[in-house]
Image: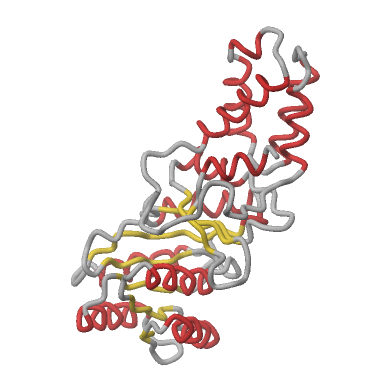
Amino acid sequence: MGIFSRKNKGEIPLKTTSTFGSQLLNIFTRSTLDEQAWQEIEDTLIMADIGLKTTQQIIEELRNNPTLKSAHSAEQGKAVLRNQLLSSLSVSNRSLNISATPSVIIMVGINGTGKTTTIGKLAHKLTQAGNKCVLGAADTFRAAASQQLQTWGQRSNVSVVTGPENSEPSTVAFNAVQEGLAVGAKVVLIDTAGRLHTKSGLMDELGKIKRVIEKHATVTETLLVIDATTGQNGLIQARVFTQAVEVTGIVLTKLDGSAKGGIVIAVQRELDVPVKFVGVGESIDDLIEFNAEDFVDGLLI
């Protein structure tokens, strides 16, 4: 369940419905599955951005399922597929870790994924749940990022610590933590500059920010923000970021409209990092806790 209250099952509008689910269900309605059917299943999974490695693993597991080895009904086929997708998304814990006081959350990712918007929405959720928050605008290379974060802070009545343009990001992060300690904040959220996952110097900077923070407080989460519409490129980004920093959770943005959403399964399964939140719109409340059952049921409508 996590720390936030969520609506009853079926009330959260996870807009993941796509041709992915309907195509797979059409194949599984066949009483027997021949080699052509299995090839169609594989093609459909790959086209849904699940990726070759994860697709091959899922296909192998489905082929070995005793229900699908023999004649089966449409409902049995759908149940097997649903269980398999849920299994692919299984993790022991998706809760946001705010066990320390203050707990520091660092938001990372490449440019354009929606990091600053996401951190503003997350601060709103935390505040609504009764947690005093401070925001740190450690993206000092882009003046608009600091202004944008201040706007989000005003909307949720959360204080924002900023620094001069092009100032040292770790200094801003340090000052934000000091502010959090001074005001008794439960959570300090640090926005960082968007960086290409191929730039090792920028990756090293993330490590420096974390080291400076941890002299005074505990980094309980490092959340990687990925644009769900980027497909396999998002998976590549996730691989590199998880190698460079200790990513504890994924936030998938833009998981609405025509986003295929299979990237959720690929990231979860290949990297063993839980998807914790998804962004499903532009409003301040459109960041929701990821729920595997809601997600899979949305795919298979």
36 is higher (above) or lower (below) than 94: above
Q: Quadrant of the C terminus?
A: top right
Q: Position of residue 211 (x, y in %)?
A: 26, 67
Relative side of 4 to 235, left or right:
left
Q: Which of the two residues, 252 or 166, is positioned nearer the viewer here?
A: 252
Q: Which of the two residues, 271 or 131, is positioned nearer the viewer here?
A: 131
User: Residue 177's quadrant in the figure?
Assistant: bottom left
Residue at x-position 73% and y-position 27%: 41
User: Residue 38's quadrant in the figure?
Assistant: top right
Q: Which of the two residues, 72 or 137, is positioned nearer the viewer here?
A: 72
Residue at x-position 42% and y-position 51%: 243
Report the residue that reaches farthest toward the bottom: 164
Q: Position of residue 251 (x, y in %)?
A: 50, 57
User: Residue 63's quadrant in the figure?
Assistant: top right
Residue at x-position 48% and y-position 83%: 155
Residue at x-position 20% and y-position 83%: 182
